[in-house]
Image (spheres, rainbow, N blue to C red):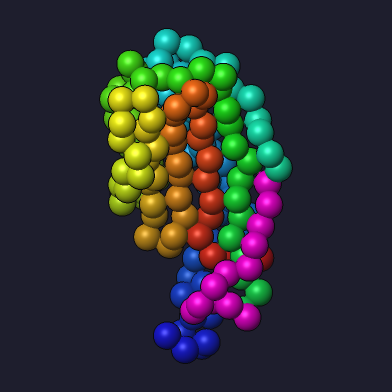
Amino acid sequence: MNADEARSVLQARPSSAEATASVVSLRDAVAQAVSQAAGGLEWQPVGEQSSAGCGAPFSGLDATTVFVGDLLAPRAIHEQWAAAQEAAQRLAADAGFTEVVVKVDRPDNHQVRFVSPDGAYLDLGTKVTTLVSGATGCHLP
């Protein structure tokens, strides 16, 4: 893809602010659904929102990926993992995050990533704690 084609792809996408708001909204909805599936979790914000430039084919086009702040619950949800993942997957799919990547699936450690066609993702994982995090794909300001 040449630079003009890459710019056209980016211009067809929502702005970075709109994409960030969508990922934050999904992150929050997933945290609430996971909390319900797991019998109640207290979520704490962890880390700050940050951004980074994009790699090829979008490098040099003023596009960024925004990493939304994480939400952390101080306990694991191994016994409720299947229900939590199902609830998260349903919400993610409704938001267009239809690709599911199981990163870890062991009895005491789970992590799954839901990915949208434009490269945005939402991660849900549990080991000692439970974490929901996400990022936009590449977007123009």
User: Does the image show residue 121?
Assistant: yes
Of the pair 76 and 38, the residue shown nearer to us: 76
What secondary structure predominates along the stretch shown in magenta?
Answer: loop
Q: Say left or right for 89 vs 77.
A: left
Q: Which residues are magenta?
A: 49-60
Query: Residue 45 location in percent, x, y?
Result: 65, 30
Quarter assignment of residue 52: bottom right
Residue 139: in magenta span: no
Q: Residue 63: horizontal and vertical position, in percent? A: 61, 70
Residue 82: x percent and y percent? 28, 25
Extreme-top residue of the structure: 39
Question: Does 56 appear in magenta?
Answer: yes
Residue 27 to residue 34: above or below: below
Indicate left or right for 76 with 80 as reference.
Answer: right
Residue beneath the point at 66% across and 57% down: 51
Looking at the rendering, which quadrant does residue 71 occupy?
top right
Image quadrant where one finds the N terminus: bottom left
Total marks shown come to 0
Q: Residue at x 46, y 84 (%)?
A: 5
41 in relation to 132, above or below: above
The percent coordinates of residue 18 (x first, y second) are 58, 54
Q: Is residue 117 left or right of residue 129?
A: left
* Horizontal relation, residue 64 to residue 113: left or right: right
- Looking at the picture, tell me which residue is in the foreground, 29 or 103: 103
Quarter of the figure with the C terminus = bottom right
In the image as oriented, which residue stretches furthest toward the right?
Answer: 48
One can see residue 29 in this view: no
Does residue 23 sit above or below 30 in this rendering? Answer: below
Residue name at image x 49 percent, y 23 percent: 128
Residue at the image position 33 percent from the left and 16 percent from the top: 79
